[in-house]
Image (tube, grey):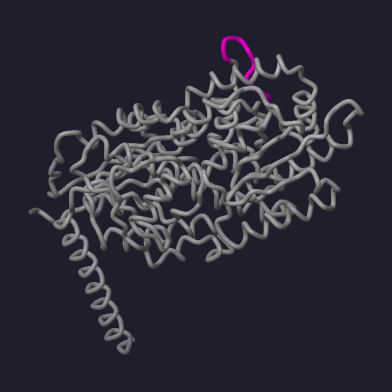
Amino acid sequence: MAMWIPMLSFLSTISAIVVASLVVAVISSRRRRRPAVGFFHPYTNDGGGGERVLWCAVRAVQDENPDLDCIIYTGDDASPETLTSRAIDLFGVRLLRPPVVVHLNKRKWIDEKSYPCFTMIGQSLGSVYLSWEALREFTPIFYFDTSGYAFTYPLARLFGCKVICYTHYPTISSDMVSRVRQRSLMYNNDALVAKSILLSHCKVGYYILFSWLYGLVGSYAHLVMVNSSWTRAHILNLWKIPRRIKRVYPPCDTSALQALPLERHAETPIFISVAQFRPEKAHGIQLEAFALVLNRLGPNIRKPKLQFVGSCRNNEDNERLQKIKRRATELGVEENVEFYKDVKYSELVELLGCAIAGLHSMIDEHFGISVVEYMAAGAIPIANNSGGPRMDIVLKEDEQASGFLASSIEEYADAILKVLTMEETERIIMAATARKRAQTFSEQVFYEDFKSAIGPIIPVDSIPQYPTFILEHRVVHGGFDNLFLVLALDVS
């Protein structure tokens, strides 16, 4: 027994030194806070709707408060100049000045490949470590998460930051728990788990625990912007901070697209699919439905063409793209399918301007920017009957239908055939209705709603000096009152 006493004493001393070092690091960083908005966006090369929100948010902050620097925390090999060019080339967003770039060296801690099992909790805890690196390198007054890493919010509060987030979708939702309970086979519930009662029960327990933790950390945000009614409902249920949640539809560039003519003069009817080559985008459903349509076409109907347009984040996405190409060959439709990877925004506008309809097939899509882009361009949307498309986007306008909703391969095929067999006048009427509906989600509307939401947190004329004395943060969560001491050290 006596031999363990020195060892325990040594470990206690080491632990005390580590804790003291962390405390000193936090205090030092709090005192060095600078008038800036730090955007936590580790992947600035994904090319999706999340990146568009990032650049529009930066532009909005620059518009409202020129005295604030905008910091981009990224793990990419990027410079202020390359990011500024990327914003204008891919999204048509012209920044007033280049952002400051803080490079993150530990991005592997949030890479899903680092966590073959328990991916959600692994990435979430890894994001805390990555956020520590970011905030130690540069501590802003305002910490703005645009990538959905809610587990970083308590740490940002510890560093004395006001925490703002734009949440595209909840990391976990009741829908995910329900699918595991029902043992449904999906991209986030593999066959091994779905076929096992024991593993399914274990995963449900894991999801319930994670939901509680996710709700706890999310409640630390001072302001939460969500992108749709679907996302708002889930975040409200999980984070339980209704007064701090604002629905701000994402910026959809409808100005250039709305200028496109509604008439389509191409001899070959074109259907377009704009989405990153990610598993949840379910490109296979579109391909199978399109092949089914080609087999059903009558002799008097022109053969259509399907164009897949999207970006690849990594090797897995590239392999997924190759798999779709191989499947097109297997189905015998490769001559009627085209692929466009990592196109510039100007090329995307041109492609949309030639399409008569746009396909979308992700289940529970949180919003669906590509669906709005179809509508603004005059392409009739055929979207999944769930999430944002069903609740916010593909709705009637002036009692007229603005598109189609589908769930199965057969329903997608039926909708494609309906578009193909429409009279040109009928198609233009629906396309015009869809375009009018798309105005609800313009960049101008985003800027107005975004600035209104951040106004109480980020003042226009001056930067407040938030006190750093002892602060208690009361979180009401799950029916219990829990007191969390955010910081009780720095009294300067």
| Secondary structure mainly formed by the magenta segment | loop
Of 453 and 4, nearer the camera is 453
Give the residue at x 35% y 40%: 57
Q: Is residue 363 visible?
A: yes
Residue 418 position within the rendered picture, expressed as x and y whole percent measured from the top left: 78, 23
Residue 379 position within the rendered picture, expressed as x and y whole percent measured from the top left: 64, 28
Residue 490 position within the rendered picture, expressed as x and y whole percent measured from the top left: 13, 56
The residue range painted magenta reads: 397-404
Q: Specify the quadrant of the image occupied by residue 383.
A: top right
Give the residue at x 33% y 53%: 72
Q: Is residue 145 left or right of residue 13?
A: right
On screen, residue 19 above or below 152: below
Screen quadrant of the N terminus: bottom left
On screen, residue 420 above or below 161: above
Q: Specify the quadrant of the image occupied by residue 464.
A: top left
Residue reaching furthest to the left: 492
Residue reaching furthest to the bottom: 3
Screen quadrant of the C terminus: bottom left
Give the residue at x 72% y 32%: 407
Q: Specify the quadrant of the image occupied by residue 20.
A: bottom left
Of 253 and 16, nearer the camera is 253
On screen, residue 132 above or below 221: below
Give the residue at x 68% y 29%: 356
Circle count: 0
Residue 289 position within the rendered picture, expressed as x and y whole percent measured from the top left: 79, 38
Q: Is residue 384 visible?
A: no
Q: Is residue 117 left or right of residue 419?
A: left
